[in-house]
Image (cartoon, rainbow, N blue to C red):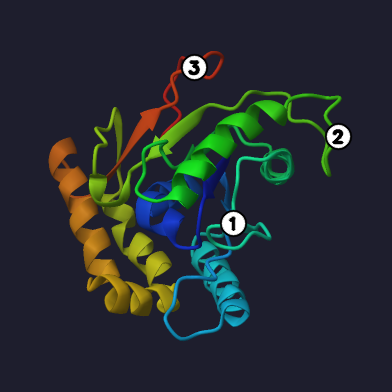
Amino acid sequence: MNVLAITAHPDDAELLCGGTLAKFAAQGHTVTICHCCNGDLGHFEIPRAELARIRAEEARQGGAVIGATVLNLPVSDLDIHPDRETRALVADAIRQSKPDLILTHPPNDYMPDHTIVSELVFAASFCATLPQLQGAFPFHPKVTPIYYMDTLAGMDFLPEEYVDVTDFFDTKTRMLSCHQSQLTWMRDHDGIDFVEFMQAHTRFRGLQAGVRYAEGFRRCATWPRQPVTRLLP
């Protein structure tokens, strides 16, 4: 199975579904992580162009932990919009990776890049199936099921399905720890230890699911995206 995680920024996938992606990879599935924004506003001191390069490399390193392919779209933070051009970029990422399952942000997450990416993924995953809609890659003949990953800190998000990531928690931690620029940013901007934040969140979902560590998801409940079998590992 081809699994595609489409997130706003480098580090979002590691934070919110890294254990699930690691589990997919360990089971032999093909994993792709696509970042729609380049993360160039996530620091106090590093200039934007330099930070974008740093974060692309951190994303590559995080994906390499599980052997994932990493795609980075050429969009600055807060410059992403649900317009035709950006939708085409996301559709091309979908056509390139040919997913059987897409993981992305829910429509009600905490900041505009996340919520706009959610909207774009819903639209682009349909547009990617249209043969006469030209793009950089051939059309993908499947309206792909979408599963929404958790919100930051789990706010206003009640999971429908859980993935036990206990055996992959150390891998998830290693993936997130590759994003050193963001560990500094979150400490200085938000006053939190980002790794500890992730650990507490994943442990909380584990308590709900009756395991040590878990990640929670909700299905995008629209036709024709309803699988008859469980897609999550």
Q: Quadrant of residue 3?
A: top right
Q: Residue at x 27, y 32 (%)?
A: 159
Q: Quadrant of residue 91?
A: top right
- Sequence order check, earlier mark of 3 and 1: 1
Cβ atoms under marks 3 and 1 closer than 8 Å: no
Near mark 1 (Cα within 10 A), the count class, few <14, some 14-19 or many ≥20, is few
Near mark 3 (Cα within 10 A), the count class, few <14, some 14-19 or many ≥20, is few
Amino acid under label 3? Thr
Question: Circle 3 sits on which residue?
Answer: 222
The one of 88 and 207 positioned closer to us in this rendering = 88
Name the image quarter holding the N terminus.
top right
Under tag 2, what secondary structure? loop
Question: Circle 2 sits on which residue?
Answer: 134
- Sequence order check, earlier mark of 1 and 2: 1
Cβ atoms under marks 1 and 2 closer than 8 Å: no
Q: Residue at x 45, y 49 (%)?
A: 112
Q: Residue at x 42, y 24 (%)?
A: 230
Q: Is residue 229 above or below residue 89?
A: above
Q: Could you give the CA–CA distance between mark 2 and mark 3, rounded to whole angstroms?
A: 25 Å
Question: Circle 1 sits on which residue?
Answer: 79
Residue 210 visible in image: no
Image location (x, y in percent) of residue 203: 18, 52
